[in-house]
Image (spheres, grey):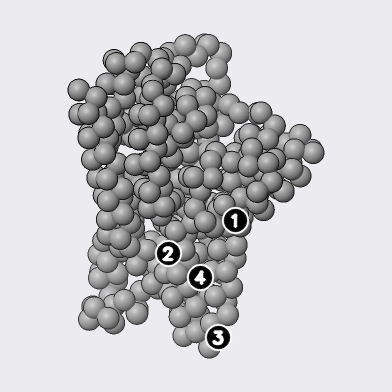
Amino acid sequence: MNEKFKATLKSSETEDWLDLHVIRPFCYYCAVFFAKFDVHPNTITIWSMIIGAASAWFFAQGSWYYSLQETGSIWQGLIYNIIGIFLLMWGDIFDCTDGQLARMTGKKSRLGRILDGLAGFTWFFPIYVALVIRFYMHHDLEFQWLGIENTEQNTLIATGVVFVLALISGLWGLQGQQRLADYYIQVHLFFQKGEKGSELDNSTRQKEIYEQLPKDTPFYERWFQKSYIEYTKKQENVTPEFQKLMAKLHEKYGSSDNIPQEIRDEVRSQSLPLMKWNGLLTFNFREFWLFLFCLIDIPVGNFLWEIIGMGLIYWYVNHRHETFCKKIREKLG
């Protein structure tokens, strides 16, 4: 593996196979290109948000089954889906590129870290709204399977149910799952590389940063920072045993730099097998299922999968991580 390329990665241990061998190498060359023109990583992040969010319109129009019923051809709906897939993948490529560009050029910033964490939510919020609209417009197939009469009243009721599923899928599923996955990546990097090699944040420190912002700080930066406090609080709320472990380590050793290497190695060895499961909560695996359900023309299936299937993976990763954190803390006395 090229050393310059490796330097742009957080760690090969926290990347899944597709990212490490396909997406990240491609994004490295994108980062080299943007570095030549002195493009700031935050600019790439904003582009990724706009491009990824633009895919929502195409997913809303992407029903090939109903295109076949109305025009006698599947191509119109299929092409809309393909364009939506292309745009979302393009947004993801730029989302990967911004981090590699930041590490390549040294242009890291607190705002960049916050923007990067928001990118996926910026894509999926309009996409989920688009899928609810798509169900409202095209639901004959689902009504036939369930034996529901296709009336305006039934359509409104069913669309309301799908909207609730989209809310649960987005707020509890997507946001909660990706927030936890990102946190566990930073935890792993903290014990692998130390505090300087990770971006492991805590809400107390983020609140201090917010309170110390100068009065002339732009309103959007203040809003992002305040949102990030809540983001880190939610990460901490679902990892109580890890928080107790960190408190114990700070009580026993003071600075994080003083944590003995054998403890770091033990946490890392327990965390490493979970990284492949943790990776399933990030974009690539989630993207696959979204594309599949859109292509088979049952987009509501994506919400059910995210709540049930991804929810079980989330529970497994969280349970395993909390269990070994508790055992290590108890060994410390």
Viewer-nearest of discs 4 and 2: 2
Q: Is residue 79 left or right of residue 227?
A: right
Q: Do the residues labelled 4 and 1 touch (CB within 8 Å)?
A: no
Alpha carbons under labels 3 and 2: distance apart: 25 Å
Residue found at x 48% / y 38%: 117
Residue 13 vertical placement versus 136 (above, below): above
Q: What element carries label 4?
A: loop
Alpha carbons under labels 2 and 1: distance apart: 21 Å
Give the residue type at disc 4. Gly
Alpha carbons under labels 3 and 4: distance apart: 13 Å
Alpha carbons under labels 4 and 2: distance apart: 15 Å
* Residue 80 percent location from the top left of the image: 56, 69
Residue 12 vertical placement versus 201 (above, below): below
Residue found at x 56% / y 13%: 216
- Quadrant containing the C terminus is top left
Residue found at x 43% / y 75%: 296
